[in-house]
Image (cartoon, grey):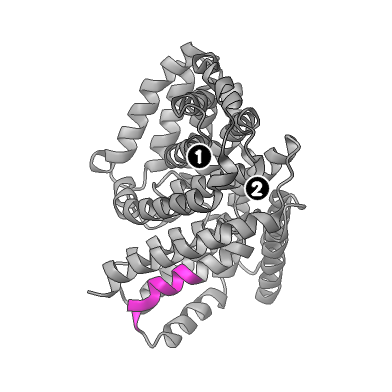
Amino acid sequence: MYLFIVIICCLTFILISASGLINKTPVAMLGACLVMLFGAVADHTLLIPVDLNVVFMLMGVMIIGDILADTGVFEWFAIASAKKMHGNGMLTVTALMVIAAVSSALLSTPVTLVYLIPVTILLAQILDLPVKPVLAMQAYFAGLGGSLTLVGSPVNFMTGLFFNISFLEVLREMILPVTFIGSVWLILIWIFKGRSLVVSTGNREHIMKSLPEKAITDRKTLKRALIPVSVTLIVLIFGTSWFGRGLEGVILLFGALVTGFLCRFKITPLLHKVNWSVIMFYGSVCILVGGLEAGTLLPGVGEYIFKYSGGDFKWLPLAVLCGTALLAVFVENIALTVLMLPLIQLIAVRFQVTDIRPVLWALMLGIMLGGSISLYGSAANFALARLAKRNKYKISGTKFCAGGFPLAFIGLMIAAAWLYLKYIDK
């Protein structure tokens, strides 16, 4: 019976990661139902891996992001930045990438791209910039910025909550490699893309005549939302000393609900801001992985890794960095993260190590960098492809990969050097 579970899980992971042609949520739900119906373990046991704290955090990020986006604040940032740069193509694109990175660190990568892509397309059209490359570059930097904080990406907060890591710990450890990678990426883009981002004088004049303040469509809601959102962020950063760890999801959802009530949203419209498809996908993948955990596959893989490494934990972070980066090209990042977390926990027990954090930083960086190569490797990239197509800009998966591969490769080299110098070469 366990072999049947393994086959179901493998087929499900292949289908949800194969391409953007298949709606991955119903496929994952179907696989989860089959595992529960025909599994060799009790149903309630399979439901244990679904972490409600992660669900609460996903809901909180979606609600806050949607409330802020409805006010037009993303559009204001983008247009004001373009005007501040006097319509200079290279500086405007740089500003858009920085905005994407910072917004992703605070509001998560998928939420940021959903609301930044339309205004990015508009600015690119006004300045006569190549739309598709600009969108791809924004996606690369959104993913990079999302890896900076606990709430920036599903990978980070699932990892952080699973291993009880605080917001400040993630930020403190990730800020150096993420900043360095981003700086190198910017230099490379300036060198190789600078000529294609030159803007004519006439187009510059168009952007200088724009009125960014007109982009704010709901000032009252924005003013009401700023204080509770700011307080929520502060509590999320420093709240572990007040409430203890493991309640980040509860804090974020509580802050989101308070923000919604202060902005006078009724409960039904507020809940409509949650992307329930993502929630159901996460829960289904957890059940699938729970089915694998119930047998010998994951412990067997952990034992193989232990024997192959000779019991030496020292080099495992580099192996996880490169291995997850490769897998992230082909496997959807939420599914890959849910699969890797219990495996890393088993490895930690087998290696008898007390500080598993270097492997966790490698996991976060590896999945982020590998996911930047594939157009369908992450929810954020998939949102980019869908929204670009809706605006009649179909982004080729091959071209996205061609642009992302050199950046990901260089990012991996930097991340590997950072891991080596900080944790291995002691």
Residue 374 locus on image (x, y percent) = 62, 58
- Above or below, 131 against 24 in this view is above
Along the line of sight, the residue nearer the viewer: 60 or 331? 331
Question: Which residue sits at x=74%, y=49%?
Answer: 23
Residue 10 locus on image (x, y percent) = 68, 69
Does the magenta run of residues contain 320?
A: yes
Q: Which residue is denoted by mark 2 in the rendering?
A: 382
Q: Is residue 193 left or right of residue 37?
A: left
Residue 57 seen in render: yes
Residue 394 locus on image (x, y percent) = 74, 44
Along the line of sight, the residue nearer the viewer: 296 or 38? 296
Give the overall secondary structure of the magenta segment: helix
Q: Amino acid at mark 2?
A: Phe
Quadrant of the image containing the C terminus: bottom left
The crowd level at tag 2 (other Cα within 10 Å; few <14, some 14-19, many 20+) is some
Quadrant of the image containing the N terminus: bottom right
Residue 354 seen in render: no
The image's mark for residue 90 is: 1
| Magenta residues (range) | 312-322
Along the line of sight, the residue nearer the viewer: 389 or 291? 389
Q: Amino acid at mark 1?
A: Met
Depth check, mark 1 against mark 2: the one in front is: 1
- Above or below, 310 against 247 in this view is below
Element type where label 2 sits in the image: helix
